[in-house]
């Protein structure tokens, strides 16, 4: 059983993801924006964070970058789970420190597979930055 933090401004999305995760035996925590997600991550110390991208205030890219810069949260894997589905979004998300990038709507099976892989230390690697 893992402690999983869902950071998403949509109550419906949080409810759906929470249902998948609880059914799989995980403990779930929630935050409805990036600022609260950072606070909750520091308080709860989750094993993994599911992060939306499009949110008011801090977006998921900014929140992920801030979490990865903080010593107390930098080792927590972040899985971006978003409607943004362009290849550049995926690359940018991984460069901010996300471990994986999932596009909504995400299937229960795909979500649980990515969580399991991330918890076991298998993360996507962003393409190298081009030097200019």
Image (cartoon, rainbow, N blue to C red):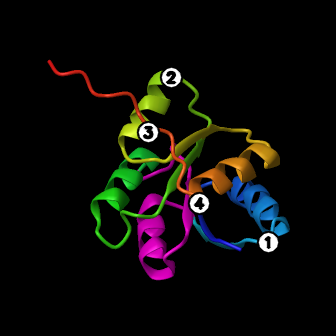
Badge 3, how many Cα within 10 Å: few under 14, some, many 20+?
many
Residue 91, percent across and down?
Answer: 43, 30
Distance in Å between CA atoms under marks 3 and 4:
18 Å
Q: Nearer the viewer, residue 39 or 12?
A: 39
Residue at which label 2 appears? 87
Which is more foreground, mark 1 or mark 2?
A: 1
Snapshot quadrant of residue 72: bottom left
| Comes first in the chain, label 3 or label 1 | 1
Residue shown at the point (49%, 31%) measured from the top left: 90
Residue 111 image point, x, y percent? 72, 48
Tell me the CA gap for discs 4 and 2.
Answer: 24 Å
Mark 2 surroundings within 10 Å by alpha-carbon count, few (fewer than 14), some (14 through 19), many (20 or more): few
- Residue linked to disc 3: 93
Front disc: 1 or 4: 4
Q: Where is 127 relative to 30, above or below? A: above
Disc with the residue nearer the chain's start (3 vs 4)? 3
Left or right of 67 on screen, residue 31: right
Q: Secondary structure at mark 1?
A: loop
Q: Secondary structure at mark 3?
A: helix
Region rendered in magenta: 32-58
Q: Which residue is mark 1?
A: 25
The answer to which of marks 1 and 2 sits earlier in the sequence is 1
Which residue matches tag 4?
A: 119
Asked whether residue 83 is drawn in magenta, I would say no
């Amino acid at each position: 059983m893992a402690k999983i933090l869902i950071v998403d401004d949509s109550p419906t999305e949080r409810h759906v993801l929470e249902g998948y995760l609880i059914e799989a035996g995980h403990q779930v925590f929630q935050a409805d924006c990036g600022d609260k997600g950072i606070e909750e991550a520091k308080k709860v110390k989750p094993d993994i964070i599911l992060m939306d991208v499009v949110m008011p205030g801090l977006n998921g890219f900014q929140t992920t970058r801030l979490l990865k810069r903080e010593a107390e949260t930098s080792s927590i894997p972040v899985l971006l789970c978003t409607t943004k589905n362009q290849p550049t979004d995926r690359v940018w998300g991984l460069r901010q420190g996300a471990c994986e990038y999932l596009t909504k709507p995400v299937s229960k099976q795909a979500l649980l597979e990515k969580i399991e892989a991330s918890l076991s230390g298998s993360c996507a690697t962003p393409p190298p930055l081009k030097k200019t």
